[in-house]
Amino acid sequence: MVSKKVFLFFVLFLFFEMKVFCSELVTTAKQIKKNTFLGQIYYTKEKSKINFKVGTNIFSGEKEGEKIVFKFTYGLETKFYPWVKFGSNLKGYTLFIPSSTVTNYYLSDYPAWIWGVGGRLLLFPETVVNPAISFDFGYTYSNTKLGNSCLKISELQVAILVGKQFRKFYPYGGFRVISLSNEKDENGEKIRGKNNNFSLFFGFAGKLFLLGKTLFEFAFGDEETLSLGIGLRN
């Protein structure tokens, strides 16, 4: 049986070794009109497996969270589309760490702030016969508080997207590879961890009104996410 001291130590050094931090794409593979801004707002619910280390012991658990994100993409005259995003985790992070007899629950004190930058490169434009294929890359950063300590998470992500228009709907999908770094700062002492992860994702965009669209996306693998949003239609 794992002692209470082990779990108290875990709270003090949260996320020493973290398995996954989710970062949804919520974008299609298609080309964007030149010199055009696209804006969207979306909600994401995420669930991730985590590992953490206390001394020589390694424990596994789960992390859950919900967030609201604003994302803006600009269509340059080339086939490269830079984007920025910012938002907040709505309720902080809830952690479920099972021991031999009970499941321990932890909730961060404050919501996490999130921001990111990146871009999407259109590799092959959509034609009557062929789907569009894009390469997306980005950096995402978030931080939150746990008592008197600070948790910082940095993520580099690359992804391949494939999609094609079918009447009023635009389904898309692909895979992404994530390199995650996290840092726990407790009274000036820093503890770091790093992981590489992989996931598959699928989604679609649909017509909402004259200039709007609905967005839906889910992912599975090393992470599970479900995203719903609205945005300007390209």
Image: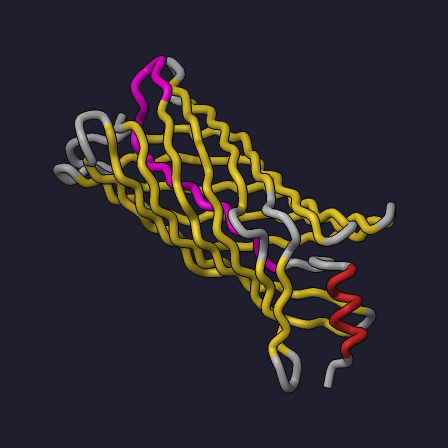
Q: Position of residue 133 (x, y in %)?
A: 33, 36
Q: Is residue 189 left or right of residue 80?
A: right
Q: Quadrant of residue 32?
A: top left
Q: Within the magenta stretch, is there residue 62?
A: no
Q: Residue furthest right?
A: 188
Quarter placement of the N terminus: bottom right
Question: As displayed, is residue 33 above or below residue 163?
Answer: above
Residue 217's spot in the image, x, y percent? 35, 48
- Most foreground residue, 173 or 88: 88
Examine the image and state in which quarter residue 157 appears.
top right
Residue 150 left/right relative to 124:
right
Q: Residue at x 52, y 30 (%)?
A: 118
Going 37% across and 27% down the picture, which residue do you hit?
A: 39
> Residue placed at 64% from the left, 73% from the top?
104
The stretch of residues the image draws in magenta is 19-37
Q: Reply above or below: 113 against 227.
A: above
- What residue appears at the point 48 percent right and 46 percent down from the top-left corner? 67
The one of 129 and 14 positioned closer to us in this rendering:
14
The spot of residue 128 in percent (x, y) is 15, 32
Q: Quadrant of the C terminus?
A: top left
As drawn, the residue found furthest toward the left would be 167
Horizontal relation, residue 1 to residue 141: left or right: right
